Amino acid sequence: MKKNFIKMNNNQNQLSLGNFCKIVKELAQNKSFANQTEIFYTLFNVDDVSDSTVNNYCIGYRAIGTEFRQKYIVYKKNYHEKPEIFDEVIIGLISILDGEVYSKISHEELLTKIENHPLLNKLIMELYNLAKNDETVPDEFTKKIYNQISENKVYQTICDILIYIVLEKKQPIYTETSQKEIIENLLNSTNISVSELEKFLKLQMQDGINYTHSLKILAKEKNPYACYEMGEMEYNGKMVGYPRYIKSYEYFKIAAEKNHPRASWLIAQMIYQKKIGDLSEDDLKLAWYYLKKAEKVGSVAAINTIGTCYLKGLVPDEKQSEEKAIAYFKKAINSDYVYAYNNLGKLYENKKDYKKAFKYFLFGAEKEESWACNKVGEYYRLGIVTDIDMNKAFMYYNLATEVPLNILDHWAYYNLAKYFYLKGNHQAGIEKNIDKAIEYFNKASQKGIMEAYEELIYLYTEKYKESGSDYHFNKINKYLSILSKDKYYDKCKGKLKEKLNEISKKHLALVKLV
């Protein structure tokens, strides 16, 4: 029987040569510098290999040839004693990423150049995330890479990852049987059939403009996946422009009857958040019923929420228990649930055990969870249980912004604007950039961060003093009007009045507002 190998450049669970090339191409500033053949030539120091050979190696249909592996055997044997042996490879990589050719530089100059190279650091982080998802990568290797990243050992990290990819990475075989077994095992604890899953997937992959109509029809058949998706659409207001929580609950309830884990968990969440009911004793019992149901059928989110309920005293007929909360958070952590890391971090931070808190926040940030990344950035910026490190603070704040908007912590935008672009940051090598500061304060203000409105008023006051422009004045007036309606206004009222007094007497009415 012919073996079917997994393609190694489009599978997010593989730390592979194909994915390495793919990420380099995505990050490269000038795409014409970053074709697959050019990257391959750089990694293996060759310039005469057929495109078909490169293609086969890079997408993963063939094992990397002996003549190319031999180069990395030499690298592996010698680079700890002669690290400069990798210089040409790394110089070539940064040339591709930056879109400009670099002449040969000394090993010491190269180490300095790459230490804070944003694209190279981004490449390393993405490869590290692949390593975490790749079940074939040993834990010891993943931990080693993480430690090297933490210590900013960029050169060594790139070398070790490339050596692993070329010499040690085994190409997994795809078999239909194993995929089917995985699906069946996932459904074992539910009342959901494989055929119900097949119907839903067929609808998702084949339906076009009539998708919502077809989804409704499938939901009428009580298909749990269709009911769950309709419930989520109603929950997010995608059907009529605003949330209809009762409708959402009705759909989720049908899916929960067939033990759909997330539907059961979301019913509990809606009750706890008072989106349905008023959190009466009966409501708490109903929420607990669905929460335990979700836990029973494998919802890690439910395990984490149970921990929160013990912490807040929301468990029917049981007392508040920090001990049980911690036990449930740790249980969720065993399944790598990122919000459980955050919850433990918050718990220890409230107890002023900042060392433990930082450890858990770091775990969350490793998984690029936005809130955790921003929190780690704060610890590095303020030097809480660690040395002040503005480079790492800048890196984690930026990482916090590289997520979908619905899970983005907008404080990261505020922190980038306030501590890096507003006045520049010498330690991180960031130049003052008022336009960037305004852009990021605006993004932060969109989520109601009043401190961002305050900073925008100061910035537009300065611009108005220079220009006398009605545009700048109107901006001040708009932001002041929003800020004056919030309780935060009392904290900054005096400073605002002092600042606005600098404006021409022509606009004393504005000053009187504060």
Image: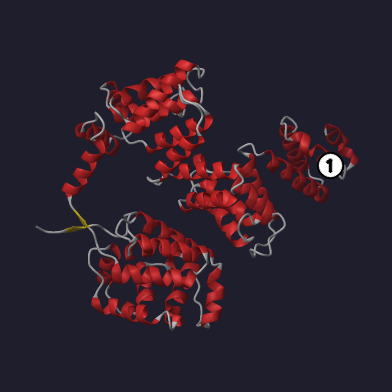
Position in image of residue 37 (x %, y %):
34, 71
Residue 213 quadrant:
top left
SS of the residue under disc 1: helix
> Does residue 328 sit above or below 16 in this rendering?
above
Task: Judge whether residue 401 can be spotted in this image.
Answer: no
Residue at horizontal 76 percent and vertical 40 percent from the top: 476
Position in image of residue 474 (x %, y %):
75, 38
> Does residue 417 sit above or below 452 in this rendering?
below
Q: Amino acid at mark 1?
A: Leu
Residue at horizontal 35 percent and vertical 81 percent from the top: 77
Nearer the observer, 333 or 274 = 333
Residue 156 quadrant:
bottom left
In this figure, what is the number of numbered marks?
1
Q: Is residue 127 left or right of residue 478?
A: left
Q: In which quadrant is the C terminus drawn?
A: top right
Q: How is the image coloured?
A: secondary structure
Q: Is residue 366 left or right of residue 22?
A: right
Mark 1 surroundings: few (<14), some (14-19) or many (≥20) residues within 10 A: many
> Does residue 131 sit above or below 280 in this rendering?
below
Nearer the observer, 496 or 205 = 496
Residue at horizontal 68 percent and vertical 43 percent from the top: 452
Residue 390 quadrant:
bottom right
Residue at horizontal 33 percent and vertical 67 percent from the top: 165
Position in image of residue 442 (x %, y %):
65, 44
Task: Judge whether residue 378 can be spotted in this image.
Answer: yes
Q: Which residue is mark 1?
A: 500
Which residue is the extreme one toward the right? Answer: 505
Nearer the observer, 324 or 464 = 324
Position in image of residue 433 (x %, y %):
68, 57
